[in-house]
Image (cartoon, coloured by chain):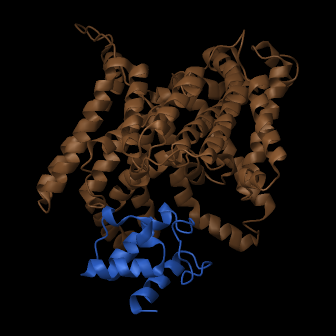
Chain colours: A brown, B blue
Amino acid sequence: MGYNTLPYLMLFLPLSLIVYQVSGRKFRKYVLLIFSWIYFFLCSRELILYLLLTSAGVWLAGLAMDRAGNRKHLKTFLVVVSAGGLFGILLYLKYTNFFINTVNVAMAGKSGWTAIPFRHMLIPIGISFYTLEAVGYLLEVYWGRLEADRSFGRVALFLGFFPQTMEGPIARYQDTALQLTAGNPVTEQQVFDGVTRILWGMFKKIVIADRLSVIVTELYHNHSAYDGVMIPVAAVSYALQLYMEFSGVMDIVIGSAGMFGVQLPENFRQPFFSQSASEFWRRWHISLGIWLKTYVFYPVTTSDLTMKWNRFARKKFGKYITKIGTSFLALTPVWLFNGLWHGASWNYIFYGIYYLVLLMLEVVLEPAKKAFYKHTGFQKDGRFWTCFRILRTWLIIFTGELFFRAEGFRAGLSMFRSGFHNFGIQRLWDGTLLKMGLDKADWVAILGGIAVVFVADLLKEKRIEVKAALAKRSLPVRWAAFYALIFAVLIFGAYGPGYRQVDLIYAGF
Amino acid sequence: MSEIESKINEILMEQDDSVNYEEEKHLIDDRILDSFAIISLISDLEEEFDVRINAVEMVPENFNSIKAMAAMIQRLQG
């Protein structure tokens, strides 16, 4: 039951809202928890045991760390066992077959070697997301920045809150836990805001992303049949599909949670206006970036190993080389983790290494960049250089997403190479694109939809909030905008004969 | 401005002299200092003030202004 489906939008969400609202204030948190567990059960059946055991384990480990007080070794033991256990489960469920395959490939052809059979793994929804939330909570308690919560219900609701279960955002305990159990009544304004945000998300998902999914599936699945200009088309289409889909689902998620008075963290901030790879990652899947920064990057940056390196290298090589070394030490685990977190496949590992190299280049080239602007006298923030940097970042994003979506690392490499053969730009207008399952009307809907989202993002970038601007207009104008959004989704949405409902991409991670 | 604060200001100015650090109250929240800048800053502060900055200190509140950094340094110096 994805967030874009009718059972969720027309039945589960309204029913949960009604039951929440009619319940007494102190019972509302239990209503949310029960609905969250029902949602999980409907999606993953008996695998809900993983969530229940994780919730209980995390709650108990937190309390045990609190009890350990100043006994540092005991606290360290507890955090290593509990967080290690959570990662162990994730590793076992998601990576066993990847390791089996790697061993089989390495040993293939050796005499006496029989290939290890693959295991049939059943993976509960959202395990990659709630595991990170759980580890974040445990580390906060370990560091003493957070007091362990005595309420099991709150810990369980934090990990299992149904709008977030499938795709995040990966929240921090201190940001959402208290809101979840506040039990405030639902207001008219919250419902109106929530429904508007959900409609906006549905617009991105079913008007744009689900249409793009048709050509993306064709181009990546039959990649050997395409070369030249069709490769950039594949790269751009997937990057846009992923943005429209993931940010659209986040709109539905944040809109749903908002109706219960829970403000979840934003996961996107106009990523296509980024001027560098590092800025892109501060605007794209923000909650994952913050998690990695807080629980991987900073601990490594401030570790004993890094401190020793800093002391040694500063005397020996000076500040510049020291910073390069420190950045490498801190960024390598971040990007390997980022790649592997997305899944057990070499193209995800490559995707992580790709961004590691790009971010290292940013560090290495920083002085040269400063010298360039200083000596040439060019205005760094001038329109030309800003546009240049944005377009350069697009190239980085599109290339990265090509490998990310490719059906394996080899396929990605082969697609990348074939992009340089037989360019054939006429294929953009000679009808080739129209033979891939989308007709002219579909392309008009895609391009029109992208234009609408682009304008909305541009306004946000200029700090003009469409919602706030509309709120100042008269009631008829506000309702007209609301209905325009409903009709856009109903009329231009990609459903009916010829379309199948497209599963949520990030729910698979 | 205290002695610690002026030294922190000097360190920051060495990184980027186009910012008026004394006035800024949201260096992290407004992304004036990004994580790359923090990497250099941590080692500069550790060396200058002979303190150990652990992961637990890595919260925006400790780095949002010169005053906040000075308070953290004083606390760590015990």
Camera-side residue of A499 and A428: A499
Q: In which quarter of the image is residue A87?
A: top left
Q: Is A424 rendered above or below residue B17?
A: above
Residue B4 appears left or right of B65: left
Label total for image: 0
Residue A95 appears left or right of A15: left
Q: In which quarter of the image is residue B54?
A: bottom left
Question: Which residue: 47% across, 45% down?
Answer: A288
Q: Is residue A106 visible?
A: no
Residue A112 appears left or right of A158: left
Q: Residue A76 at x, y = what percent?
A: 18, 52
Q: Residue A296 at x, y = what percent?
A: 37, 51
Q: Residue A94 at x, y = what percent?
A: 36, 26
Q: In which quarter of the image is residue A113?
A: top left
Q: Is A294 rendered above or below residue A196?
A: below
Camera-side residue of A382 and B21: B21
Residue A256 appears left or right of A66: right
Q: Is A33 rendered above or below residue A468?
A: above
Q: Is A297 rendered above or below residue B12?
A: above
Q: Residue A349 at x, y = what percent?
A: 45, 34
Question: Which residue: 52% across, 59% down?
Answer: A363
Q: Can residue A73 be seen in this view?
A: yes
Camera-side residue of A447 and A366: A447
